[in-house]
Amino acid sequence: MDRSLFLRIARAIGTSLFFIVVALCLAITIVPPFLDRIYYEGPVSRHYDGAHFFNPDGAIEPPVQPGRSRHGFVARWLLGSDDRPDWPDAVAVRQARPAPFAAPRGMKAIWVGHATVLVQAAGLNILTDPVWSDHASPLPPFGPKRVAKPGIAIEKLPKIDLILISHNHYDHLDLPTLKTLWARDKPKIVTSLGNDALLKAHGIAATALDWGQSVTGAALNDLVPQAVIQCETYEHCPDYRVHVTRNHHWSSRWGTDRNRALWSSFFIETRAGNIFFAGDTGAGDMRWADEAARIGPIRLALIPIGAFRFWPGQMQSDAHIGPRQAVEVFERLRASTAIPIHWGTFRLSYEKWDTPPRMLEHYLRCEGIPRSRFAPVKIGQEIMVPTVSSVPHEKPSCDERAIKALQ
């Protein structure tokens, strides 16, 4: 190659690289503020300072291994160089074909994957945090990729009456899925403060409530979101009632909009019994589970068990409960039956694909809880939820070394 031509090419490449570096530097200083969003404005409260929401029981700290830096952790996580255990590229799933609805007093549930569950109760079809996308990311095809296809093909879903959205992370608030369901069924959507603004920007209507507020199916049907706590007991309320309840988490779509919208769990009263959906949560003070239990007896609880480990041996993180804490939540809720969720779908953390359910089995044995009450299920498996019952149990000895050996 002619030397002058080589120099011109090298100079062009060098110039291009220079402008790319300059653009990246500008992005770091300009783009994040631009991407900040104000989803909610309202009065200051015990968990809202006028601009951002916060956990009154303590702040969420990033899951950084002792002796390591936060920036180093993020870089290693993004580059996949943090020595995470291997996950399968794909997990076999037998997709379910649910019936149109459950019997008047019946309750069935199908774990679709991650935090998505179809609950059919007394003729009501409920979806929690529906995600059918292949990637949980703002920039697909980058970001966490689904290793297990949804337990129900989206076109095989029955007509959805109610959707619950716990917060705005991409593995819980999936706009492509919500647009599809909204266009098809126009379901009622209940979420926590601020998330309705994000949905409204995409033509999707939702009712957003604060912790401690509730709304009836009649109020939703009449498009009166303000009609909260309008009847004293459920027996006087038609169809169902949704309570937005406290948990311990955080929110963000872009990083700079951190905690501009609220996160929550939900307590749903139906004529077939009560349902609790923990959303995505860390332990915090754990009293949020006690608060939910005081609303009434729980026939079915949906409790996360995964994404708790970010270095070898870690047992929980501030933002996610692990199997040990999931068992404590189950006992605090005094739930009759539970389904463990938030594992085995998207690789978000350090544990092996099957560490959460294997560890859960150990802790259930440690507490003497019958496996039938809180058993790991397969994606796509239909569960017939028994009626509420209280089963006393004794605590046998617990082999902590066997549990900690699970990586």
Image (tube, rainbow, N blue to C red):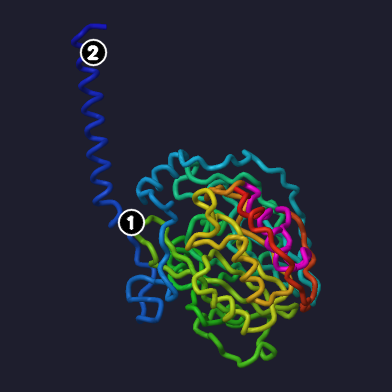
Residue drawn at x 52%, y 82% as measured from the top left: 213
**Residue 113 in view here:** no
Secondary structure at badge 1 equals helix
Looking at the rendering, the stretch of residues picked out in magenta corresponds to 353-379
- In this figure, which residue is indicated by the disc labeled 2? 6
Secondary structure at badge 2 equals helix
Q: Is residue 134 magenta?
A: no
**Residue 349 in view here:** yes
Query: Which circle's residue, 2 or 1, is located before the other in the chain?
Result: 2
- In this figure, which residue is indicated by the disc labeled 1? 35
Residue drawn at x 65%, y 40% as measured from the top left: 90
The quarter of the picture where residue 39 lies is bottom left
The residue sitting at the left extreme is 4
Q: Residue flagged by tag 1: what amino acid is it?
A: Leu
Is 73 placed left or right of 219 in the picture? left
Q: Residue flagged by tag 2: what amino acid is it?
A: Phe
Q: Position of residue 173 (x, y in %)?
A: 52, 59
